Amino acid sequence: MSRILCVWELGDDLGHLGRFSPIINELLSRGHEIFFIVNNLSKIETFLWNRRVTFLQAPVWYTRPLKPLTTYCFADILLYKGYQSPATLRPLVTAWKNLFDLIAPDLIIFDHAPTALLASSGLSVPRIIFSNGFVTPPPGSPPISLRPWELVENERIEKIDAHVVSVINTVADDFNLQQVQYVSDLYSVEKVVIAGYKEIDFYCATRPDAIYVGSILSSDIQQKPYWNISSSQKVFAYVKFGYEQTLLILDALTKLGANVVCFCPGISPEASHKYQSAKMLISDSPFDLLAVFNEANVVVCHAGKGMVDACLYFGCPMILIPTQLEQINSAKILEEMRVATIVNHNDSYVVIEDKFNNFFNDPRYIENAKSFAFKHQNNIELSSIKAVCNVFETFL
């Protein structure tokens, strides 16, 4: 039996937990001892976990800027996560190093965990990244714009990357850790396993040796979806209450008379009562996604990587409502592939209604989605949770 440490440091959505859940269950079944350091302990009870998993809170930097700043490059993501200065980064690295000393793992698996990667760079322990492509820049790659649809000055990108590199190297020198040339060098590990498809990996052109595993879905959520009308097209919607377009989207689905099961976290009782009907089931609790995709024909979501990968695997066309930069990049790629249409943050109800009508009346979306799924049925390097865990075990 080996002691395996899983790490989720940054990111807010449930996809990080959902990605690890089936992997951890499989590793436990093989007799390993599992520690899981998570970004947000309040979210772990969304899934069913074996009691043998030891959960710990990740060291994270809670100070936030007064107003959201535009992200132009990967270093911008880190800047207000503790990388402003050596004084803000040093305590985080100290805390991570203390956790590694206490746990003494035989293997560490990272999902969006730059500071944990930095703090572990001096350990003689095999390290694997198991994450999505957008938050895993290829090591050795210079900074690039994360907004390819905009004109962004290279000088600005290089300047912020150089600042964050300087902060990293100052702290690394304090702890006798590896120095970096670019921020991307934090991601130099024994193996990179990308949960997703190469076609929608932001860095696919410069990532030579990653393993792509397609869709990783958890079935550890008890609530099953139920569509009242079995004869019509089944729509699954995952939209967040409080986002400015959510109610407009629910209005459009209602007017279309769509057959909908909707997960809307945080929805108010008043809004839930308004939209609940014979054709629309509304819940503020998540559904078992394997059960969802066994029946759903269309998915409406915010373009989170876990949902997008599952849609591609099951051949479901998408209506996407991206709310942050990673989702915008994924949505633009999927729209170009003609498997999705995008609802933008400033779209009016009339525009949304028009997009919905065009989407549901255009058979090419579902044809292209089914074609992608069929093409990749036997074209994924690691097509099962067992195969992913086999790779992890080769480093023990």
Image: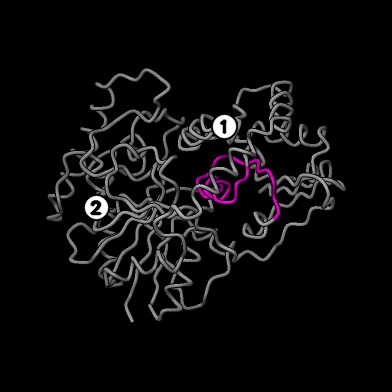
Give the residues drawn in magenta, as a range. Answer: 295-316
Query: Could you tell me which secondary element the residue under label 2 belongs to?
Result: helix
Residue at the image point whose x is 62% and y is 29% from the top: 343
Rate crowding at label 2 as few (under 14), some (14 to 19) or many (20 or more) other CA atoms within 10 Å.
Answer: many
Vertical comparison of 351 with 80: above or below: above
361 displayed left or right of 81: right
Q: The C terminus appears in which quarter of the rendering?
A: bottom left
Q: Nearer the viewer, residue 160 or 380?
A: 380
Q: Nearer the viewer, residue 247 or 61?
A: 247
Q: Which residue is mark 2?
A: 118
Residue 278: give x, y in percent of width and height: 87, 48
Q: Which mark is residue 296?
A: none
Residue 349: give x, y in percent of width and height: 73, 24
Occupied quadrant, residue 351: top right
Q: Is residue 194 magenta?
A: no
In the image, what residue type sits under mark 2?
A: Leu
Q: The N terminus appears in which quarter of the rendering?
A: bottom left
Vertical comparison of 389 with 367: above or below: below
- Disc 1 or 2, which lies upstream in sequence? 2
Q: Which mark is residue 338?
A: 1
Q: Nearer the viewer, residue 338 or 126?
A: 338
Occupied quadrant, residue 81: top left
Residue 89: give x, y in percent of width and height: 27, 47
Give the CA distance from mark 1 to mark 2.
39 Å
Query: Could you tell me which secondary element the residue under label 1 belongs to?
Result: loop
Residue at the image point whose x is 40% and y is 81% from the top: 31
- Give the label, 1 or 2, closer to the camera: 1
